[in-house]
Image: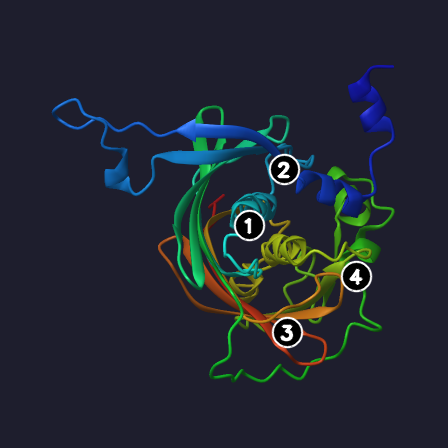
Amino acid sequence: MTADALAESSPLPPLEDLIEVLTLRDVGTAHIAVTDVQGKDAAESIGASSARVFEGRSQKMPHGRVFGGQVLAQCVMAAGITVRDVSESGAVRPIHSLHGYFMRPGDDTLPIRFAVEEMRDGNSFSTRRVHAVQKGAPIMSMTCSFQARAGGLDHQGTMPQVPGPEGLASLADAFRGVDHPGARHIAESRPIELRPVESNMFLDAGPEKVATNHVWMRAVDRLPDDPLLHAAVLAYSSDYSLLEPVLRRHGLVWTDPRLRVASLDHSMWFHRDARADDWMLYAQQSPSAESGRGLSVGEIYAQDGTLVATTAQEGMVRVKES
């Protein structure tokens, strides 16, 4: 039996597989060359003359395309590795924001390289620019910022009053035993457990066309005690259901054969520390959809009501006329 066949016959458990995907390999440094009209090197004119390069593999998907949340999470890991121990005191600088654009679909059979430009390391903040590259072209470009924890003003919104995760059916339970590649993937291969508060958006958009959605989510097992890994897994999880308020508002489900959906961009602000293996409520709403694009904004709360993160994503949402 070949190594590939062996891997197919005895895959890692879903969460172990995700952790391996997020364990990037440092493959060196790339020199950035920019030549001006006089033929001189002008790399400094774009803010960086080199990039650290990391490589990671992809999770297998039923459709053969890389899951966008995976690339988000890998970009977070690549940038975070370069930020560790940048201050003289050795103080940890957690990620506090990211802004990324999805440019091309990724091929889940090929590795992805992540080029990290170290834009600035100040007294409190570190800024990075990351390009995820496959087949010689970027599939995602992200800027992200990290900050050493500090005191200051502190307030947050209130978590919505919705049923807790106990007693709600998970997506995995809903699709367990269904003989379809997509259903088997949801039931057996996802590293994140999702429990919709409202209806299951793969099967039923619900009786009311409302632009809101609530989902409880957590990793399927315990994660190592690494804050960067937890932030990456939270970014990974945030991409699963964020466009569902757009669909619910128009009575659409993921399995509608007319539907064409693709993430265009993704922003995320990390407010407070959280464990991605504890239950979190993802409260989502869509303020607008037009021109074949839908916008959703999300708030992620720990189960005790602490606001952990805020997200925003615009996606291409088209309904093909028959």
Residue at (23%, 27%) from the top-left corner?
41
| Residue contact between numbered discs 3 and 2, judged by CB atoms under 8 Å | no
> Can you give x and y, in whole percent of width and height, for residue 66 in the image?
59, 37
As displayed, is residue 62 above or below residue 101?
Answer: above
For marks 2 and 1, the one nearer the N-term is 2
| Closer to viewer: mark 3 or mark 2 | 2
Q: Badge 1, how many Cα within 10 Å: few under 14, some, many 20+?
A: many
Secondary structure state at the residue bearing disc 4? loop
Left or right: residue 4 versus residue 232 is right
Image height check: is 261 above or below 303? above
In the figure, residue 223 lies in which quadrant?
Answer: bottom right
- Quick check: marks 4 and 2 in contact, CB under 8 Å? no
The answer to which of 208 and 149 lies nearer the viewer is 149
Determine which residue is flagged by label 4. Answer: 170
Considering only order in the chain, which callout, 2 or 3, is on the residue closer to the N terminus?
A: 2
The local crowd at label 3, few if under 14, some if 14 to 19, many if 20 or more residues have their Cα within 10 Å, is many
| Residue carrying label 2 | 24
What separation in Å lies between label 3 and label 1 (alpha carbons)?
Answer: 23 Å
Q: Which mark is residue 80?
A: 1
Q: Nearer the viewer, residue 186 or 99?
A: 99
Relative image position of residue 319 (x, y in whole percent): 48, 50
For mark 2, give the secondary structure: loop
Crowding around mark 4 (Cα neighbors within 10 Å: few <14, some 14 to 19, many 20+) is many
Question: Alpha carbon of mark 2 to alpha carbon of mark 1: how far?
Answer: 11 Å
The picture places residue 271, in percent across and down from the top left corner, at 54, 71
Q: Callout 1, which amino acid?
A: Gly
Mark 2 crowdedness (10 Å alpha carbons): few <14, some 14-19, many ≥20: many
Q: Which residue is outermost to the front?
A: 88
Residue 52 seen in the current view: yes
Disc 1 is placed on an element classified as: helix
Real-space CA distance between mark 3 and mark 2, rounded to the nearest whole angstrom? 28 Å
